[in-house]
Image: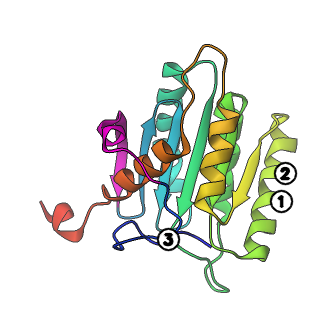
């Protein structure tokens, strides 16, 4: 199950995070009503409220290129989807699939893990695995894309994937706090009118 929005008073399953960690280095790279993208250390953080489309390609390419320049030893991506596809709203259209192909071709070799947190929808999870497997086959770049229905499992997997001798090890609570902070950066209609 996708964790509730951090605006709820006591979201269940949240990891405790020391207030000192909230002074972390989150770099917000992009904000629009459909998504907020940022970086924390060597992890690209994405919170989405709608499906990936072709219009998202440039934003995602820039975000991954920025992170890859900063961390040439490898990066991870964690994306939290705050929407659920339905029968009339597929998870991704053809433009979205082309976007994934281009992202995999351009930056796939640098990504140690792509953790995708989404609703508990077995059909959607299977469809996304199929898309990423096909992209990996086409690009000849192994893509470690893992769908999760639990944020805690996803952040633990990202932290494990990013362990690197000589580098500071990220804590799961840091990523949860960073995602919470990033999600609050979603522009409101009032922000857009300014």
The picture places residue 57, in percent across and down from the top left corner, at 53, 47
Residue for badge 3 = 12
Viewport quadrant of the N terminus? bottom right
CA distance for labels 2 and 1: 6 Å
Based on the picture, tell me whether residue 22 belongs to the magenta stretch: yes
Judge whether 17 appears above or below 63 on screen: below
Labelled pair 2, 1 in contact (Cβ < 8 Å): yes
Q: For residue 188: magenta?
A: no
Where does the magenta region start and end? 16-32
Mark earlier in primary sequence (3, 1): 3
Q: Residue at x 69, y 40 (%)?
A: 113
| Image position, residue 178 (x, y; %) | 41, 46
Q: Which mark is residue 134?
A: 2
In the current view of this chain or complex, which residue is farthest to the top? 166
**In which quarter of the view is residue 25 placed?**
top left
**Dot 1, how many residues are within 10 Å of its Cα: few (below 14), some (14-19), or many (20+)?**
few
The disc, 2 or 3, on the residue closer to the chain's N-terminal end is 3
The mark closer to the camera, 2 or 3, is 3
């Amino acid at each position: 199950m996708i964790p509730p929005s951090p605006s709820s008073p006591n979201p269940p399953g949240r990891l405790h995070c020391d207030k000192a960690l909230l002074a972390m280095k989150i770099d917000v790279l992009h904000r629009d009503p459909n998504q907020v993208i940022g970086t924390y250390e060597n992890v690209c953080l994405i919170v989405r409220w709608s499906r990936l489309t072709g219009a998202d390609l440039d934003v995602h390419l820039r975000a991954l290129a920025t992170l890859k320049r900063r961390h040439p030893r490898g990066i991870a991506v964690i994306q939290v989807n705050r929407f659920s596809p339905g029968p009339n709203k597929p998870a991704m259209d053809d433009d979205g699939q082309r976007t994934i192909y281009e992202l995999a071709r351009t930056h796939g070799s640098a990504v140690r893990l792509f953790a995708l947190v989404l609703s508990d929808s077995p059909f959607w999870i299977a469809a996304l695995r199929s898309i990423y497997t096909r992209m990996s086959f086409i690009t000849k770049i192994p893509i470690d894309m893992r769908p999760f229905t639990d944020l805690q499992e996803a952040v633990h997997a990202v932290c494990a994937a990013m362990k690197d001798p000589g580098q500071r090890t990220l804590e799961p609570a840091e990523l949860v706090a960073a995602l919470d902070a990033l999600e609050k950066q979603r522009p409101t209609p009032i922000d857009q009118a300014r």
